[in-house]
Image: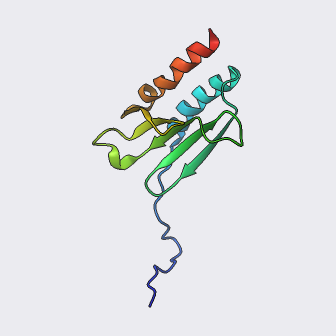
Amino acid sequence: METTTPFRPGHLPEQVAFDRKELGVILTLYGRMVAAGEWRDYGISCLREVAVFSIFRRTAESPLYKIEKRPKLRHKQGMYCVIGMDGQILKRGQDLKAVLRVLERKLIRAVE
């Protein structure tokens, strides 16, 4: 006998998402990198435990970077992190702007 949780209207599973302020910070950096010719596309995924902003050089490729928000890690390592193409965590912390500075350094190199 299979047990499933019945669908109940108004009772959807919780999702993690970026709020307006967080998206503003991310999209400001994204716009600057697009203007520099470094990035071309993005995707947003809102899942149960994590929200992911994926950054692409070209649409058909795998993401160059992923910016993740994991509220469950808020009191441990920090809920924001930037992950590189190879899966390596480049920066993690509580402050989104501070975490994104690892990507802003790449903008400085791109403009020079």
Give the residue at x 42% y 38%: 80
Residue at 45% over, 27% down:
97
Q: x%, y% of residue 56?
A: 64, 36
Please state if 23 lies on the left or on the right of 88 as rendered: right
Q: Is residue 101 above or below residue 89?
A: above
Quadrant of the image occupied by residue 62: top right
Question: In the image, is 75 to the left or to the right of 112?
Answer: left
Q: Nearer the viewer, residue 52 or 106?
A: 106
Q: Out of 91 and 30, give the one closest to the viewer.
A: 91
Q: Nearer the viewer, residue 25 or 106?
A: 106
Q: Residue furthest front?
A: 86
With 58 as the anchor, is 18 left or right in this view? left
**Which residue occupies the extreme bottom position in the image?**
1
Residue 44 is situated, as x and y percent measured from the top left of the image, at 59, 46
How many marks the image carries: the answer is 0
Q: Is residue 8 left or right of residue 94?
A: right
Q: Quadrant of the N terminus?
A: bottom left
Q: Which of the pair 84/19 is nearer the observer?
A: 84
Where does the image place residue 25, in percent across and percent down from the top left?
53, 30
From what the image shows, is residue 12 above or below residue 95?
Answer: below
From this view, report whether residue 46 is shown above or below residue 30.
Answer: below
Q: Residue at x 60, y 39 (%)?
A: 63
Res. 34 image quadrant: top right
Q: How is the image coloured?
A: rainbow
Q: Split into 4 quadrants, where in the image is the C terminus?
A: top right
View extreme (left): residue: 76
Residue 35 in the image, given as x and y percentages of width and height: 70, 22
Residue drawn at x 47%, y 65% as measured from the top left = 13
